[in-house]
Amino acid sequence: MKLEQMKVLLRERKLDAVLAACPANIRYLSGFAGTESYLYVSEKRGVILTDSRYTLQAEEEGKGCEVRTIRRDLGYGKLLAQLLKEEQVENLGFEEDAMLYGTVRELQQEAGLPPECWRMLGDALSSFRKIKSPEELDRMERAERIGDEAFSYILNELKPGVTELQIAAKLEYFMRSHGAEGTSFDTIVASGYHSAMPHAVPTEKPLENGDFVTMDFGCRYQGYCSDMTRTVVIGKADPRQKEIYQIVLEAQQAALEGLRPGMTGTEGDRLARDVIEKAGYGEYFGHGLGHSVGLEIHEKPALSTRDETVLLPGMIETVEPGIYIPGFGGVRIEDMVVLTETGIRNLTTSPKELIEL
């Protein structure tokens, strides 16, 4: 239990206790990986509130935490009421972004603590996860290595006639069979005109000669996510495909070479965006350059036009510029990197030169 970090937060916010609801934050703070549970933390204790499906898991994983299990006659609100009474809590912090309004209102009524005593935490708990520990980085590096191995494997499976759905299934099976707990998000396989959709859903469309094929995938290893994207061409690439691919590759390389601690997420985004805009394709790069990754696939800070967070050593970011032209297709190339004292260390090792199959 990361109780010392929480003690600092409690004192800074003048809170008697905190009720965490975000599964990733609960796992980070306590080690418990179940869902539909809460974590109560005061200066003296951590208590996992859960149901009978997770009691044994919580006792095993929640090192240093008490475990209290709801029953038909003792729901979360009444359990919380017991804790608030035991510790005479007057000010309780809660994760408003991770809880439904109706749930908060129900807990307030059952726990007997007036709404004015519930204090919104914003992203205070999530902010603990911005800088990764060496152990976290090891897990993420292993997850990304599984992704690299999956990409090497899938190149032999990309042939005309194979569908996007089949490729997605092959990627996911490979990652699971090589140590992954599961995927870190829904696998994207987008071919031909579908590749112009950054978050396309795989379909029964078969791969065809001349198609761009964009594959965006990742896996979870001991709770931590990986994320990578590669775009290839089935058959021979035409001159325009080569041009688009080269621009995206140069944009990514500019970002990888220029990214460093001390700059803001906006400045990091600009490294790649300037290259694409200068080439005349700025309107076809609509999303941010990247995002942080950890226990969740999308974490903060981001590399985007709107994130002024200062980047620090130990932060993880994806670097994924793209160009997406409706009716023609698109290219995205994505690596996952960790900020170091002087620049970055790239966790993704798959080749990035244009591959024609």
Image (cartoon, rainbow, N blue to C red):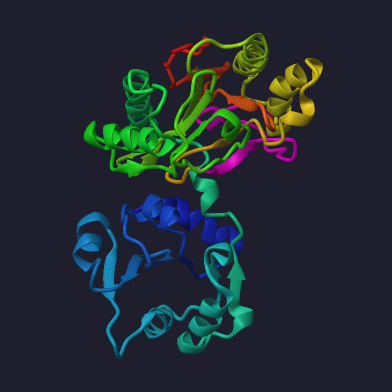
Image position of 170 (left or right of 238): left
Q: Is residue 306 magenta?
A: yes
Image position of 269 (left or right of 108): right
Residue 312 seen in the figure? no
Residue sitting at x 27%, y 76%:
69
Q: Is residue 210 magenta?
A: no
Up/down of 39 relative to 193, above or below: below
User: In this orientation, which residue lies closer to the viewer: 144 or 276?
Assistant: 276
The quadrant of the picture occupied by the C terminus is top left
Image position of 94 (left or right of 28): right
Q: Position of residue 174 (x, y in %)?
A: 28, 32
Up/down of 133 relative to 247, above or below: below
User: In this orientation, which residue lies closer to the viewer: 138 or 187?
Assistant: 187
Name the image quarter holding residue 13: bottom right
Residue 92 seen in the figure? yes
User: In this orientation, which residue lies closer to the viewer: 177 or 189?
Assistant: 189
Q: Position of residue 317 (x, y in %)?
A: 55, 31
Residue sitting at x 53%, y 68%:
94
Q: Position of residue 322 (x, y in %)?
A: 64, 26
Up/down of 306 relative to 336, above or below: below
Name the image quarter holding residue 291: top right
The quadrant of the picture occupied by the N terminus is bottom left
Q: Position of residue 137 (x, y in %)?
A: 39, 31
Name the image quarter holding residue 161: top left
Residue sitting at x 32%, y 52%:
31
Q: Identify the residue at the far bottom of this view.
A: 73
Residues in magenta, as a range = 298-324
Total tally of numbered discs in the picture: 0
Image position of 72 (left or right of 200): left
